[in-house]
Image: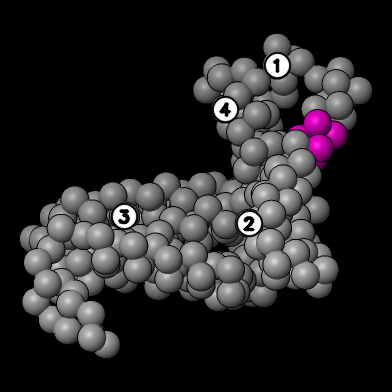
Amino acid sequence: MSLARLQAADGNSSAARIGSLAHLGIFAWALLLVTLAAARNDQWVEVLGLLVVGAIYPLGVSRLARPRWLLLFVILFGVTMLFGDGEPDLLLLGLPLASQNLLAATHMLVRAMVILLAADGLATSIDVTEVAGLFERVGLSGLGFSLGVAVNLMPNIREAVTNAWHVLLMRGGFRAQWWRGLQLFFLTVLTNALRRSDDIVLAAESRAYSPERSRKFSLRVGRLDWLILLAAVFSILLVLLLPG
């Protein structure tokens, strides 16, 4: 699927004005912001990252609201809250809990959501040839193709996960022997991912692809890209300068 179609599917009217350079910058900005938030323990920085990335990739927000992702978030939140090193100082539904663990679990959940939204937005917005061309330009022959394939496989893997999950549910794969159903589920997802990767490699070989002869494609630069990158740099500097 082309970049223009992916941007149109996101439902954002300004998507056509945002190029691949901005999407890469947004992903790097989100990772750096989460890292700074963890180091400085700034709650408002995490919330800022979640609001900004969610506003840029609204379709990603709807995907994270699906039951399987909500279940993953609940498990992550529960494990962090129950097995933290804080001392119990409050009672919730008859369970002694530590407010320190509750706060740490909330922070971890918000950071995970920021990273997942940024990664999903990058995977569905950038073309594999642009990723490959970026690494080829800095002298990493072949790595750009490999990383580009990995990034663009994410939508296919997500689709395979959804299809395999629904098929197993309709056939009762999680009723009597749910552990066997989980084994079949992960095996199906892994097999589909490997088959898709093999198809891409065969297609590249059939076109006489070679890392030594890779073309150095340029990134798509939209009208708002430099403004977005400038805002990202300014916001990071602001976080660094403001007291924690």
| Residue under pointer 4 | 135
Report the Cα–Cα distance between label 4 and label 3.
24 Å
Looking at the rendered structure, the kind of residue marked 4 is Phe
Q: Say whether marks 4 and 2 touch (CB < 8 Å).
A: no
Looking at the rendered structure, the kind of residue marked 2 is Trp
The crowding category of the residue bearing disc 1, from other C-alpha atoms within 10 Å (few below 14, some 14 to 19, many at least 20), is few
Q: Is the C terminus in the top left, top right, bottom left or bottom right quadrant?
A: bottom left
The crowding category of the residue bearing disc 3, from other C-alpha atoms within 10 Å (few below 14, some 14 to 19, many at least 20), is many
Indicate left or right for 14 with 195 as reference. Answer: left
Q: Position of residue 144 (x, y in %)?
A: 62, 28
Magenta residue check for 199: yes
Q: Say whether marks 2 and 3 touch (CB < 8 Å).
A: no
At 29% from the left and 62% from the top, the residue drawn is 80
Report the Cα–Cα distance between label 1 and label 2.
43 Å
Magenta residue check for 141: no
The crowding category of the residue bearing disc 2, from other C-alpha atoms within 10 Å (few below 14, some 14 to 19, many at least 20), is few
Element on which disc 1 rests: helix
Looking at the rendered structure, the kind of residue marked 1 is Pro
Report the Cα–Cα distance between label 1 and label 3.
34 Å
Report the Cα–Cα distance between label 1 and label 4.
11 Å
Labels 4 and 2: the sequence-earlier one: 4
Name the residue at the bottom extreme. Answer: 93
Q: Say whether marks 1 and 3 touch (CB < 8 Å).
A: no
Residue 67 falls in which quadrant of the image? bottom right
Q: Say whether marks 1 and 2 touch (CB < 8 Å).
A: no
Element on which disc 4 rests: helix
Report the Cα–Cα distance between label 4 and label 2.
42 Å
| Residue under pointer 3 | 33
Q: Which residues are magenta?
A: 195-200
Q: Which mark is residue 211?
A: 1
| Residue under pointer 2 | 179
